[in-house]
Amino acid sequence: MQTRNKPVILLVAEAVTLAHFARVATLAKALDSSMYEVILASDPRYADLEKPFGCAFHPIRSIPSAEFAHALARGKPLYDVETLTRYVEDDLALINRVQPDLIVGDFRLSLAVSAPLTGISYAAVVNAYWSPYADIAYPVPDLPMTRILGVRLAQKLFNAVRSIAFALHARPLNQLRRRYGLPTLGHDLRTAYTWGDYTLYADVPELVPTRPLPANHRHLGPPLWSACAPLPDWWDRLPADKPVVLLTLGSSGRVDLLPMTLSALSELPITVIAATAGKIDLPDVPANAFVADYLPLDSVARHSSLVICNGGSLTTYQALACGVPILGICSNMDQLLNMSAIERLGAGLSLRAARIRPPQLKQAVRALLETPAYTQAAGQAGERFRQVDAGQRFRAFISEILG
């Protein structure tokens, strides 16, 4: 048996959306390669946005993002038992190959089986609004019933059946654990999403109110990430006399809304910078808009007065770190929960993707640009974010666990 000089840290991302991959890649970069052997595992679909990794990379399968999005849109469990079983087989093969001392995962639900089977400690990275200790309300996502009944009636129905819905979503993972001789995690998808020997919240405590947390739950702070993409050729030609609005609906937003959104924004005295994530061709771009597939989010956000996005944490936290208010065009529960936290801070507004119309969009953009309180609140959040070094906290956690 080969003697190892350094502990091995395996970080696994479920790359159904860019956010899960980006957070794990950011945490991997925070570790000192002279102290640890760092291994990043993910489906390679987003790998080109992060290269070079600075650590070993192992490809591992994730379901197609479109399949994941389809399940979200219909309110169905995101994975069935057969899919999770294949994931466990892949996990175990990888773990056997690299022999880690610690596993860190972001939404790789199968690790709630794979890690216990191998006896290796597992830390789950997740947003605090999914915590079973979160003291928040749960908005009804855009589901078929929401479109039929309207948001108000659908919310009442959702409130009545939420515990049943959460139990149904937790069921496949519980069935899988039973298959492998492990106890179930109970009937709450929040426990399924956050289970680990350690749970690391990718947030600051001020974002999501919680009841007292157990000792193995802790806040890392937001792991900020930006695509490894150059500034486009048109960057130096941006007008300097109008507010700049960054528009990106990301990997999990309603990209089909981009043409309508760009058309509505063309009627406002602003300059629009749009990132398509390579998901849509835009043959008719308004005169006030500049378009690219991907942009370096940190550089562009610092140059912006407003960020319009799908409401997910990856883009919104980068915007807040730059002191920029946010308009979230949300559809799934993760996005709605995240924007609820940002609205509580006073740093943004949210609209539902299924119900958005040009007048409503323009009204929200005007309010965010013309009301100083939104920018002030975003600036205060940015100050708080800058006080929290997620990388340093992650290194401290690793050092504590591995001695």
Image (spheres, helix red, strand yellow):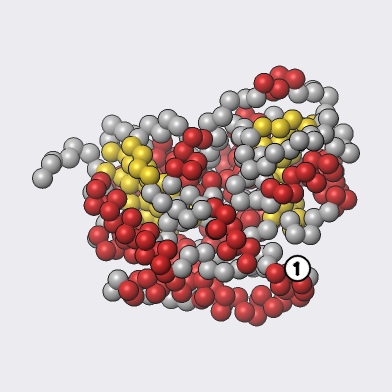
Q: Residue at x 56, y 79 (%)?
A: 164
Residue nearest the observer in this picture, 41 or 62: 62
10 shown above or below 355: above
The x, y position of residue 334, in whole percent, is 60, 58
Quarter of the image where the N terminus is located? top left
**In the image, is 244 to the left or to the right of 138?**
right
The x, y position of residue 176, in whole percent, is 37, 71
Q: Residue at x 67, y 32 (%)?
A: 292
Whether residue 80 can be seen here: yes
Q: Which residue is mark 1?
A: 147
The x, y position of residue 336, in whole percent, is 66, 59
**In the image, is 327 to the left or to the right of 30?**
right
86 shown above or below 24: below
* Label 1 Cα crowd, 10 Å radius (few <14 / some 14-19 / many 20+): few
**In the image, is 155 to the left or to the right of 225?**
right
The x, y position of residue 267, in whole percent, is 89, 39
The amino acid beneath tag 1 is Arg
Residue nearest the observer in this picture, 344 or 259: 259
**In the image, is 143 to the left or to the right of 42?**
right
Residue nearest the observer in this picture, 239 or 202: 239
Q: Residue at x 63, y 56 (%)?
A: 335
